[in-house]
Amino acid sequence: MPQFDPAYWFPQLAWLGAIFAVLYFAVVRPTLPKVSRVIDERESRVAGDLDAAEAAKASADSIRTAYDSGMAEARTAAQAEVAKARETAARAVEARMKDVGGRLDAQAATAAASLDAARGQARAGLAATAAELTAEAVTRLIGVAPAPQEVEAALAARK
Amino acid sequence: MANPMEQFAIERMGEPMAVGGMDVSFTNSALWMLIALALVSAFLFIGTARPQLVPGRAQAAVELVYDFIRDMLRENVGKEGLRYAPLIFALFVFVLACNLLGLIPFIGAFTPTSHIAVTFGLAAIVFVLVVIVGFARHGLHFFSLFLPEGTPIFVAPLVAGIEFVSFLSRPFTLAIRLFANMTAGHVLLKVFGGFVVLLGSFESVPYLFGIIPLGVNVALSALELLIAVVQAYVFALLASIYLNDAVNLH
């Protein structure tokens, strides 16, 4: 086997040494760190992006929570406002009703009083007319004009 | 039948060269190592020409291999091991390129990693790295590597001896595993290739019987492709496991 012929060993070792030295120092050392840098940069970039995404998600979550709590607060406030408005309106209506009712009652009372007065007047008028008629009738019947006091007394007795 | 060992022959190309009296002639082995170097260089220079956050095809391919090496180191050595990723990467891609290039048919491809000198040279790089890292990180404490924790004192010399021998044998096992796998696979391919010619050249029934070894050779080629990748992986994996000893002791 040519492999075990020592005469070939040294030339191969010498060329291997030279070629491997070139490979390592002139090819691998200048080129590989570039790839290494890019890989590191990519890893840090990806990690940074992930962190940014996480932060964005956290802020979105907090905004969401704030929005929810704000909404709930606004809803309670609105409900309280509505209840208050309703109560105020009810109270106003009630007051108005009472006011209007009072006025109507007063008007009714006034009307009733004037009705009573009118009725009294009418009745008084009626009595006077009745007395006149009676006096007239008595005059025609007996030719004597009775005294007004007598007629009134007689009418009063008939009532 | 052609000699299946012929494919491993080292042939000088051009004039003999010598440095300080030592033969350093350019050979087919050196040529194919240069081709591997060119291939890896193209792979890396194209892949990292304009590094982008969202990688293109070439960059994604480089990143795939690099991530593979980094994961292996992270798993076997820990975060500290990532510092040696470029060297393990270089070993892996170089072994892989040599293994795969040698499988190309028709063009007279030569597999540098089927030679023990080359695999031993690569294993020696790992061994020297482990020793340097070990002493640099732990000083003389690095010798405690040879005495696993909890060893009873009366067997300590024996255990230390065994551990020391096993430590010294690492570059050899690393080298021989790769060389033997590559050599055996290529010999097998050539032997069955010889059978194709032998069995297919009966004068009465030409070609017919050559089909069976041809089929075997197709299957073997797929297997060799797998072995080429697996052995490069095993080489890098063992290198990182040995590195773990140097970085973390036990």
Image: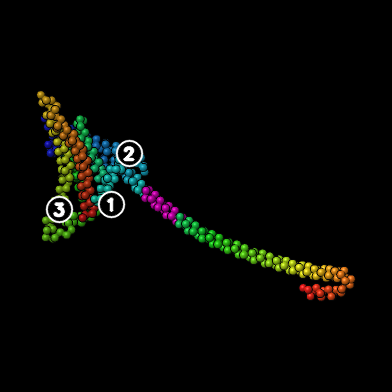
Foreground pick, A85 / A108: A108
Q: Nearer the viewer, mark 3 or mark 2?
A: 2
Q: Nearer the viewer, mark 1 or mark 2?
A: 2
| Residue A50 among those drawn in magenta | yes
Residue on which disc 3 sits: B163
**Amino acid type, label 1:** Lys
Residue on which disc 1 sits: B79
Q: CA distance from mark 3 to mark 2?
A: 46 Å
The chain carrying label 2 is B
Q: Are marks 1 and 2 in contact (CB under 8 Å)?
A: no
Give the position of the C terminus of chain A as an image quadrant: bottom right
**In the image: residue B106, left or right of residue A158:** left
Which corner quadrant of the image does residue A93 belong to? bottom right
Give the position of the N terminus of chain A as an image quadrant: top left
Foreground pick, A29 / A48: A48
Q: CA distance from mark 3 to mark 1?
A: 26 Å
At horizontal 89% and vertical 72% (from top left) the residue drawn is: A144
**In the image: residue B52, left or right of residue B248:** right
Q: CA distance from mark 1 to mark 2?
A: 28 Å
Give the overall secondary structure of the magenta segment: helix
The chain carrying label 3 is B
Residue on which disc 2 sits: B57
Residue range corresponding to the magenta coloring? A45-63
